[in-house]
Image (tube, rainbow, N blue to C red):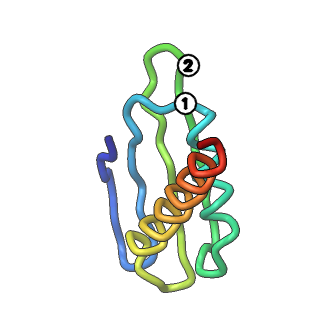
Amino acid sequence: MIKIVEIGRDYVKFLLRGEDHTFLNLLQHYLSNDPRTVLVRYNIPHPLVGEPEMYLRTNGSNPIEVLRTAGEKIAEVCNELLEQIK
């Protein structure tokens, strides 16, 4: 579940409840490869009880659209993998 903590014209700070380094690294990878991304980082304050927090800054593009694009690309890759396994 994504919970937006702070949002501006070119940045968003959000929590990703129930996620760990596995998904956060994947999301960070796809966000980093988007030319609209200026900065992306995440932090897990405590591995057992902390809620992972991610920060995304763009070059002026809508940060939610950049995040949505990364999510769609991840879904495409997962679907391709599932098709290959069948």
Foreground: disc 2 or disc 1: 1
Looking at the image, is 4 positioned above or below residue 16? below
User: Is 3 or 33 nearer to us in this picture?
Assistant: 33
Q: Earlier in the sequence, mark 2 or mark 1?
A: 1
The residue at which mark 1 appears reads as 20
Numbered-mark total:
2
* Residue for point 37% across, 33% down: 17
The reply to whether the C-beta atoms of the residues labelled 2 and 1 are less than 8 Å apart is yes
* Residue for point 45% across, 24% down: 50
The C terminus: image quadrant: top right
Q: Dot 1, crowdedness within 10 Å: few (<14), some or many (≥20)?
A: some
Residue 10 placed where, x, y %? 45, 77
| Residue type indicated by callout 2 | Pro
The residue at which mark 2 appears reads as 47
Residue 29 placed where, x, y %? 68, 56
Q: Dot 2, crowdedness within 10 Å: few (<14), some or many (≥20)?
A: few
